[in-house]
Image: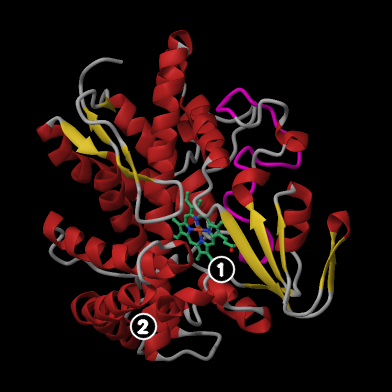
Amino acid sequence: MSKIETSDYKTIKSALVNRNLKQALYDKGKVIMDGVLLTLHGEEHRKRRKLEHKIFQRDFFKYYEHELFPKTLNETIKPFLNKGSADLLDFGYRITMNLTADFAGIDRPKKTPEETEDLLSLVKVFSQGATLVHSKRPHDEVNKEVLMALNEFEEKFLSPSKKRREKLITKFKNNQIEKNELPRDVLTVLLINEDKISLNEDLIKREIAFYLQAGSHSTANSMTHALHEIFIWGENNPSEFNKIKNDSLFLQKCVHESMRLHPASPVAWRKSECPVKLDNNIELDKGDLIIMDLHKANQDKKIFGDDSDIFNPHRIVPKNQFLWGLTFGIGLHMCFGRDLDGGIVSNENTDPNNHQYGIVTLLVKKILDEKGSPDPKNKPKSDLNSERPNWGSYPIIFGEKL
Ligand code: HEM
C-alpha cells in the first residue's frame, strides 16, 4: 500500500467526488465510528444518507435559526453575561451541544446547565475517540473512556429519548397523531426507518453519538477561530471594525473567510477500492491511501489569490467556488450541517433582514453585540491534546473596549 499526499485544490476536489475512494480517516476511531454515516461507502452510504437527509433541509434550518435558536442562545449566554466573562470554547460547546442534540434527537428534559454539562462531558470523550488518528494520548486509554461514555450516554440520555419517540411513533402508526407532530430529528427518522435499511441498537447508539460530536466540536471551534481572526483584524483595521459590527452580511463573509483558514478537519483521508486516476496525473492502486491537506488546499493561490494565507474578508473568489473552500467537504460525504452552520451565501439581492446567516455567524454576532473582547489578563491557549490546530481555551470579557 502506498501513501500519496496532496494539497492541490483541484486534485482534492476530484478525489472527494470519486466513488472509488473510500473514507479512511476514522479507521482508528472504530469504537465510536464503526458503521456511522461518515465511514460508510457505496450503496450502504447512499441509503443511510438519503434516510437522514430528511432532517437536513434548508426550510428547517431557516426555521431553526429564526424561531428556535435565539431563545437557546439567550438562555445559554445569560450566566456568562452575568459573570462578565466567558471562555469561548466553554460557551461554544454549551450552545452547540443544545443545537446538535436537537438535530440528533437527544432530549434534555431538565433543561439545566448541569444537564448540558453532563451531556457535554460525554460528547467530549466521543470527540477524542473519533479523532483518535490525531490524538497524542495513548489510544487504548481513550478507547476505554469512549466505551464507558457510550454506556453512560445510553443509560442517561439515549434510552429515555428513544422511549419517548417510540411511544409517539406508535401513536402515529395508530393514526392518533399526525406525522408533523413527531420530533424532527435523526433518532426519530432511524426509529421509523421508512426505507427499512439495516440497523441495530448498537449502531443507532454510535450514529447518534457521532452526530453529537460531529456538530458540536466543529461549530465551537469555528466560532472561536472566527472571533480570533476578527479581533486581530479589528485591531489592525479599526475603521473597518464598525462595518463588521453593523453589517451582518459582511460579518458572515468574515466567518466564511475564517472557515477557509481553519477547516474543522484539516485533512481528509481516502483509500482506493480499485485503480484510480485523479487530476494532475495522480494514480492510485487498489488499497492506496490518499491524504488530502484541506488546510493547505484552502490557501491554494490559484483559487484564492496571492494573499490566500491571510484573513481578508474582502476576498473575491471565482464564481464556482465557495469562500470557505473545502471546509465542509464536497461530494459524497459533504457536510449535512453546511447550510445550518455556514448559512446561505449572500448576493446583491439579499435582504439582510430575512437572510439565513448560519449558526456560526449568529454566535459571533452575539459575542460582538455584547462587546466581547479578549481578556487581557488571560491569554488564549492552544489545545495540546490534539495535533489539530485548535484553541484549548479562549478567555474573553464582556462590555469593555471595542
Ligand atoms: C463549522 C461547522 C462544521 C464543519 C466545518 C463541518 C465539516 C464537515 C466535513 C469536512 C465533512 C466531510 C468529511 C469528509 O469528507 O471526510 C462533514 C461531514 C458531516 N457533517 Fe459536518 N461540519 C460542521 C458542522 C456540522 C453540523 C452542525 C452537523 C450536524 C448537525 C454536521 C453533520 C455532518 C454529517 C452527518 C457528516 C457526514 C456526511 C456523510 O458522510 O455523508 N456537521 N462535516
Eye-nearest disc, 1 or 2: 1
Q: Amino acid at mark 2?
A: Phe
Q: Residues within 10 Å of mark 2 (few under 14, many from 20)?
A: some
Q: How many marks?
A: 2
> Which residues are drawn in magenta?
310-334
397 lies above or below 142: above
Q: Dot 2 lies on which element?
A: helix
What secondary structure predominates along the stretch shown in magenta? loop
Residue 179 visible in the current orientation: no
Q: For this rendering, which residue is in front, 245 or 299?
A: 299
55 lies above or below 341: below
Q: For this rendering, which residue is in front, 251 or 149?
A: 149
Q: Which mark is residue 25?
A: 1
Q: For this rendering, which residue is in front, 275 or 360?
A: 275
Identify which residue is drawn at 44% across, 65% down. Answer: 131
Instruction: Report whether 134 appears left or right of 79.
Output: right
Q: Residues within 10 Å of mark 1 (few under 14, many from 20)?
A: many
Q: Amino acid at mark 1?
A: Leu
Residue 241 visible in the current orientation: yes
Does the beta carbon of the residue at mark 1 sit less than 8 Å from ligand 1? yes
Identify which residue is drawn at 38% across, 70% down. Answer: 129
Identify which residue is drawn at 73% across, 34% down. Answer: 301
Name the image quarter holding the C terminus.
top left
Answer with the quarter of the image where residue 228 lies. Answer: top left
Residue with the mark numbered 2: 172
Q: Dot 1 lies on which element?
A: loop
Name the image quarter holding the N terminus.
bottom right
